[in-house]
Image: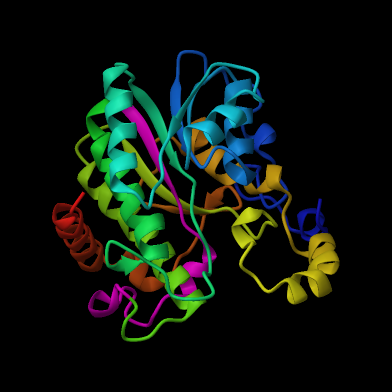
Amino acid sequence: MSLLSKLKPNGKNGFGYGSTAEMVTAGISLVGKTILVTGCNSGLGFETMRVLALRGAHIIGTARTAAKAMAATRLVQGLTTPLACELADPQSVRACIASIKEKGIRLDAIIANAGIMALPKLETAFGYELQFFTNHVGHFILVTGLLDTLTDNARVVILSSSAHQRAPQQGIQFDNLDGSKGYEAWAFYGQSKIANLLFAKELSRRFAATGKTANACHPGVIKTNLGRNINPLITNTIGPIANALLFKTIPEGAATQCYAAVNPGAIGISGAYFADCNVAECRADANDSALAKKLWERTEEIVASLKI
């Protein structure tokens, strides 16, 4: 537990910065529920899978390869189904979707947890900057491909980040999605995270006439494999101090997405941005419905143009 976990007060719902995934799901039976978690093989994804399976849910756990998904699910007590879903490979994502449909699975929640962060140099996939493609486009293909498998009151939770604040001034650089006009690691990570937020908000708008909900969340600052591209000189120097003072633990980091996905306190909340297990404020343009709609339509064009 970090110092901030001890000092920050809980929110109106009784949960907050120091709450863990087990705490926000305590007393909740998920028996009969099926939940998809991407990136189940490490960090927040593994803890989310472990806790929700502990509460009785059937977890569809995805990772970049079937071997990684299988190895992770074997470590969890409860009902799990491992599947490969490499978000940077549309063919893998579509195979995952097809497998779920072939099995006749109905999903009560999707937790779009997986992602990559702050790549030190420009990398691309299918002509698009890799963080944008993996974090946003890959999850867009997955979630929209599974919409007809959702139950009537299903919840979709998209992992965003407070780093969405570091996105370019215009939110999404539609004229530079390949990074060819300039690349900066944190700005492009921020762009992918504001894209996650905008996706959740537009999906929520499209869910308006249904009982389904869609929300985005910031897990907090956690030392996981996601930060493997950060300069080791920095992490080795300030890491011990940051661990003690600032970083959430993995159980604390998994709490917000678990809260949004299954806690009764989140019933009926849609189009929101959660942080510390409570609804929080996001950057102003993340609430821009016209920008969200434009991103959705541009992403549809990207997906339709993929040559696989």
Examine the rendered structure and indicate whether residue 11 appears above or below residue 243: above
Left/right of residue 16 with respect to residue 286 in the rendered view: right
Which residue is most to the bottom?
181
Front residue (pair 225, 16): 225
Q: Position of residue 12 (x, y in %)?
A: 60, 47
Residue at image position (61%, 31%) is 72
x, y percent for residue 257: 53, 43
Question: What residue occupies the far top of the structure in this picture?
Answer: 32
Q: In the depicted view, which residue is nearer to us: 246 or 73?
A: 73
Going by the image, does 177 lie left or right of 35? left
Tell me if I can see residue 204 in this picture: no
Residue 158 located within the stretch drawn in magenta: yes
| Residue closer to the observer: 173 or 289 | 173
Magenta residues, as a range? 150-178
Q: Which residue does the image show at 65% across and 60% down from the upper left?
A: 221
Question: Can the viewer see residue 250?
Answer: yes
Please state the horizontal and vertical placement of residue 238, each as a whole percent of the image: 81, 73
Seen from the viewer's position, the closer of residues 306 and 201 is: 306
Q: Where in the figure is residue 20, as x and y percent of width and height?
A: 69, 40
Q: Residue at x 33, y 41 (%)?
A: 93
Is residue 134 located in the magenta-colored stretch of the structure? no
